[in-house]
Image: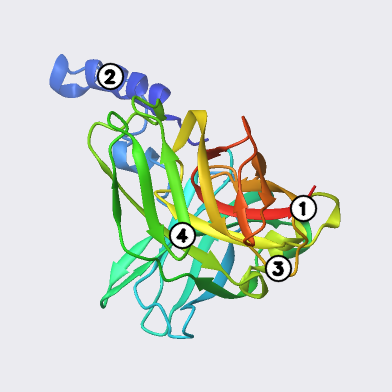
Amino acid sequence: MRLQRPHLLLATLLLWGCSDDNGGADTGLPDVGVTDTLPDKGDQGPQPDAPITSEFCGQLVDTTGANVAGGDVIVCNDVECNTGTADGSGAVCVQVIKLGDYLFHATEREAAGKHLGDVMFPVALSAAEVGTKVDLGTVTMPLLGAKVKLDPQSGGTLDLGGGAKLTVPAGATVLPPLSTEADVAFAALDTAMLHSKLVAALPGGKSPQAAFVIVPVGVSFTTPISFELPGPSALAVGTVLEIYRVHNETGKLELKGEAKVDSSDKLVNEAGKGLSALGVLVLVEK
């Protein structure tokens, strides 16, 4: 019988107290060394199975088709986030363990003279994909325009270039709270370059009519702000679009405003229905 560690200690003390060196009593017990009763190092009994890892893999490129070497990716579910960094060819894999829904997020990046915007879309790991590499294909990161300072205390109109303007009221409440000015930048996205996972998540199977990235992602306003954005020329004047934002923690699509095509093919907000958050924005017909 192998002794477990508490019983082993008791037996050792009894033997020590009855040994020849402590009064010469003959216990009649065999002389058992402590090391003789320890279990073998490898004898630890049944062990739980090691978790089976899976991977979400993609190829990061910018809108010119150039590989994004060193780009950072975060993959999150509702419990934890895992990270990965693209190699010299722009290839990246991020390990996950649990089944279910995730956010795939290629984060804003400034390198090699380029300022690239975030890419976010929902992904899911199914039982059939456990232990495999899930190939997400090409992930296209947009080239952002020039940075413009946002001071929520003074507010004002931000001309982001490319036909995009945001009007922030003075003293606007920004969440998370900004302790200093924020750098805001904008990019219009070719809807053909949106990841298929994002398009598939649009409500009602609708097709994207326009898409934009406005950084920093995750910034929201308690009072919707006015905006002017470049509109698709194919839509009739007066067409109303719903603005969905990819949530920067869950990957879920959230309705964050409405836009209307005006007479100059621009997208503007209707009264009281401005933009309430920055981030990856996709617009569909209402």
* N-term-proximal mark, 3 vs 1: 3
The CA span between labels 4 and 3 is: 16 Å
Report x, y in % for residue 103: 58, 52
Badge 4 amino acid: Asp
Q: Alpha-carbon neighbours of circle 3 within 10 Å: few (<14), some, or many (≥20)?
A: some
The image shows residue 183, relative to residue 140, as above or below, that is: above
Q: What number is the disc on residue 239?
A: 1
The CA span between labels 2 and 3 is: 70 Å
Identity of the residue drawn at 32% across and 32% down? 152
Q: What number is the disc on residue 118?
A: 4
Circle 2: element type: helix
Q: Are marks 4 and 3 in contact (CB under 8 Å)?
A: no
The CA span between labels 4 and 2 is: 66 Å
Badge 3 amino acid: Ser
Report x, y in % for residue 241: 72, 50
Tell me if residue 50 can be seen: no
Report x, y in % for residue 57: 56, 71
Report x, y in % for residue 182: 29, 44
The CA span between labels 2 and 1 is: 88 Å
The CA span between labels 3 and 1 is: 25 Å
Q: Which residue is mark 3?
A: 196
Tell me if residue 179 can be seen: yes
Circle 3: element type: helix
Left or right of residue 29, residue 22 in this image: left
Q: Nearer the viewer, mark 2 or mark 1?
A: 1
Badge 1 amino acid: Thr
Viewer-side residue, 276 vs 62: 276
* N-term-proximal mark, 2 vs 1: 2
The image shows residue 53, relative to residue 268, as above or below, that is: below
